Amino acid sequence: MAMLSNEEINNIQRTANIVDIISSYIPLEKKGSNYFGICPFHDDHNPSMSVNEKKGIFTCFVCHKTGNVFSFVQDYENISFIDAVRSVAEKVGIELDVNFKTTSKYDRHYEAVDLANKFYQNNLKSASGKKAREYLIKRGINEEVIEEFGIGYAPSNYDTITKLLLNKNFDENILLETGIANRGNNLYDLFRNRITFPIHNANGKPIGFSARIYEDVDEAKYINTKETVIFKKGEILFNYHRAVNEARRLKYLVVVEGQMDAIRIYSVGIKNVVATMGTALTPDHVHLLKKLNVKIVLCMDNDSAGEKATLANGEALSKAGVDLSILRLSGAKDPDEYILRNSVEAYQDAINNAITFFDFKMNYLKKDKNLDKVDDVSTYINQVVAMLNKTNDEVLIDLTVNQLSEEYGIDKNILLNKIIKVEPVNIVKVEPQKKVRLQKRQKLCELLLYYMMNDIKYIKLYEQELSYVPDDTYIEIANDILAFYLKYNYISIADFITYEIDSNNYELVLSIIDNNAKVELSDNDYVGIIDKIKVIIDEVKINELKEKLKTISDINEKLKITDEIAKLKKRMCN
């Protein structure tokens, strides 16, 4: 595992408090002996995720996602297990002097984009990149920002980067599949005579580019990497890998339209900012933003398209239950221009005074209406009332009704009656996923294994009284628990999850933990479980002996087997 031993991984896990780690992603509230929070792995609206600090595990009672601190970070951040270990280690201040390089079937794709990125960056510093660099400086993008964001320059030549990568033994298909090159009569560079902005995934790996013209030419302002095997436009937010920690610290994230806007905002000290790869947020973007569990400040461009994008994106985020504010700038077309014309302090003030999405929609509904006309006022009020019927926030309803009543001189009761008459929106309740009903033997075996994962004394009693599990599905897990105990001389359910990460039984281990998460461990109950399993073992043995009787003709052998069956039945009755 990337040259990191199980002992080192277990030490990280013991150092990390699972409540502290998970609460850095989602709010947790203590109830009884456990902590509870909104589960980020399904569309949760009521706290259904339980975190057991003592055992070091979490489980959701609705979607049944279960695991330890590494499992949570791995699934939350959508990263590899070893990257999750590294992330947790960093959070608890453990330095790891190990090689974390992991293999992927797309390693050469990542290497090609990385090499192209370095080439473009070096090229910006060359004589051929002088005009592009001057353009950036003129736009207020200094050397420090250029270095921070890895901004580069793609030369005007037909196939410079293509030849370079081919000479480095990259296959033509790699160049085509990463969008670095296109095919005409021959392979040629996609990006030519443009400033390049590398786009990174959540782990900080460059996976594509956005390339901008810097001269007054009749070409598209931006050309972006097409959809590739490593670059999924609908899943990526520009600057996310830099912004995520600051967003969690400050409890909000600014979402803007363009890369230049994000770069400008970040460069003046507001580092919790990302940019969309277009104006529309996809369901994957919304899910990514919701998982952050911070307020989203949506700041689209100050034009008609930006206003429509604000409405569409706001609806998507609001529907997903995201805490949302809207920032509409005045006197500038976008945040980049706003900051240059005013100041970073002015932009920060604008962020602090961002309005609610509901207020934005109320303002939006006033567009193109003459509110001195009765018909337009009536249309506007009916549209607002329709909005109110989509919320369960009684305070918002009361405040809005009072505002409309005072502003337009309408009887409050008339408005309230209109709200009552509108059909309420059906609220879809998330039902817990149905678990597969286990047979009696399976349930007993799972209980046995769950006890063994939690305490050495249950392992020792298992060895003394049983020594094996009467079900082929679970016998390997029992053996793995014993192997863990013999190797480390202790047992920890959280550490055992890590131990099984590469096992074929990993998902079954998590399922056993989830199925029994509410079980209170009891020595007497465990003895009862063992006794019941002994009965099952005896039943299996009796059936085997009965089948054997059918094949034996020797009377003495038959008497011997019959006697053994009688003893087993007697033991079962005691």
Image: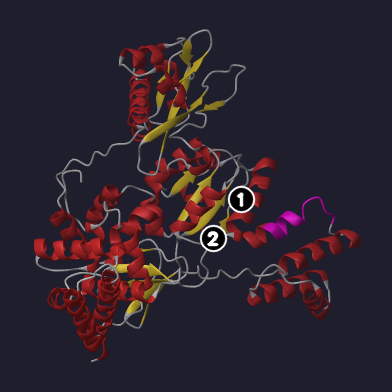
Q: Is residue 507 visible?
A: yes
Q: Is residue 216 magenta?
A: no
Left of 384 or right of it: where is 336? left
Q: Residue at x 29, y 50 (%)?
A: 81
Can residue 68 be seen in the rendering of this structure? no
> Which residue position holds label 1?
313
Quadrant that contains the C terminus: bottom left
Which type of secondary structure does the marked residue at label 2 adopt?
loop
Query: Which stretch is magenta?
Result: 361-370
Q: Earlier in the sequence, mark 1 or mark 2?
A: 1
Marks 1 and 2: CB-CB under 8 Å? no
Residue behind mark 2: 322
Residue 432 locus on image (x, y percent): 51, 70
Identify the residue at the far bottom of this view: 574
Q: Quadrant of residue 174?
A: top left
Look at label 2 and name its amino acid: Val
The answer to whether 152 is drawn above or below residue 350 in the figure is: above
100 versus 391 height, above or below: above
301 left or right of 21 in image: right
How far apart are the two marked residues, 1 and 2, measured between alpha carbons? 11 Å
